[in-house]
Amino acid sequence: MDPVATSAPAFANTIDLHINGTSHSVTIDARVSLLDVVRDRLQLTGTKKGCNQGACGACTVLLDGERVLACLTLAVQCEGRQVTTIEGVADDAAGKALQAAFIEDDGFQCGYCTPGQICSAIGMLDELRRGVASAVTSPESSLPGALSDDELKERMSGNLCRCGAYVGIRSAIQRAHNTGAGRRTP
Ligand code: FES
Ligand code: FES
């Protein structure tokens, strides 16, 4: 008898996940990450697995509009909440603007980090709009305000690009921010 086939039910949970506006009922081990559910169970492979330990940002998605690392988020924590992956960002004004800006400004090379960069940038621009300070925001700054290069680097520092396409990535995010197209409707 296969021991793997008989060991899972003790931890199995059936949960409803709302992803990109669609409900999915999935029966999963309670220890499974959101990343593994979206990629392996729901075939939403736009979200990438890089380090699988919270260090690269390739797996960034939006949970109730806030950016999170899907590899460090349990799928069971997401029940009843709204998950947006890169497949769903075209329905979002900020997402659409950022996707266009990444193409316009060559914000990628291999593209592996790009879904995470765009999801993270959507969440980051929304944090800026809401006046959330970063580690480099000075007490004199009035938020929301201009997105300086230091602010942008700091706020996107959790998203690594192994191709080193940072110049284009920053330019694309600045373009979306400066045109106002990157701002989400409240
Ligand atoms: S795969 Fe999640 S942070 Fe690297
Ligand atoms: S474009 Fe290749 S890892 Fe960023």
Image (cartoon, rainbow, N blue to C red):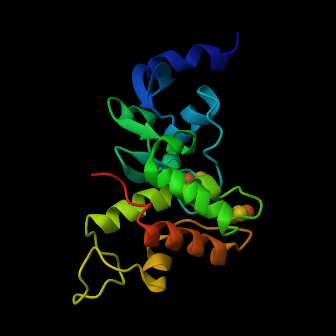
Question: In this view of the protein, can residue 28 be seen by the observer?
Answer: yes
Residue placed at 64% from the left, 30% from the top? 43
Residue placed at 30% from the left, 65% from the top? 129
Q: Does residue 109 appear left or right of residue 62 in this picture? A: right
Would you identify the image quadrant in which residue 160 lies? bottom right
Q: Does residue 156 appear left or right of residue 5 in this picture? A: left
Residue 99 location (% of width, % of height): 59, 55
Residue 107 location (% of width, % of height): 66, 67
Q: Does residue 129 appear left or right of residue 181 in this picture? A: left
Residue 147 location (% of width, % of height): 41, 78
Question: In this view of the protein, can residue 53 be seen by the observer?
Answer: no
Residue placed at 65% from the left, 38% from the top? 45
Question: Against 147, is 87 above or below?
Answer: above
From this viewpoint, which residue is outermost toward the top?
Answer: 1
Viewer-closest of 53 and 45: 45
Q: Does residue 145 appear left or right of residue 108 in this picture? A: left
Question: Against 139, is 113 above or below?
Answer: above
**How many tags in the picture?**
0
Viewer-closest of 82 and 186: 186
Viewer-closest of 7 and 134: 134
Residue 138 location (% of width, % of height): 28, 88
Would you identify the image quadrant in which residue 162 lies? bottom right
From this viewpoint, which residue is outermost toward the front?
Answer: 179
Residue placed at 56% from the left, 45% from the top? 86
From this viewpoint, which residue is outermost toward the right?
Answer: 110
Viewer-closest of 137 and 145: 145
Quarter of the image with the N terminus is top right
Question: Against 77, is 153 above or below?
Answer: below
Q: Quadrant of ligand 1?
A: bottom right
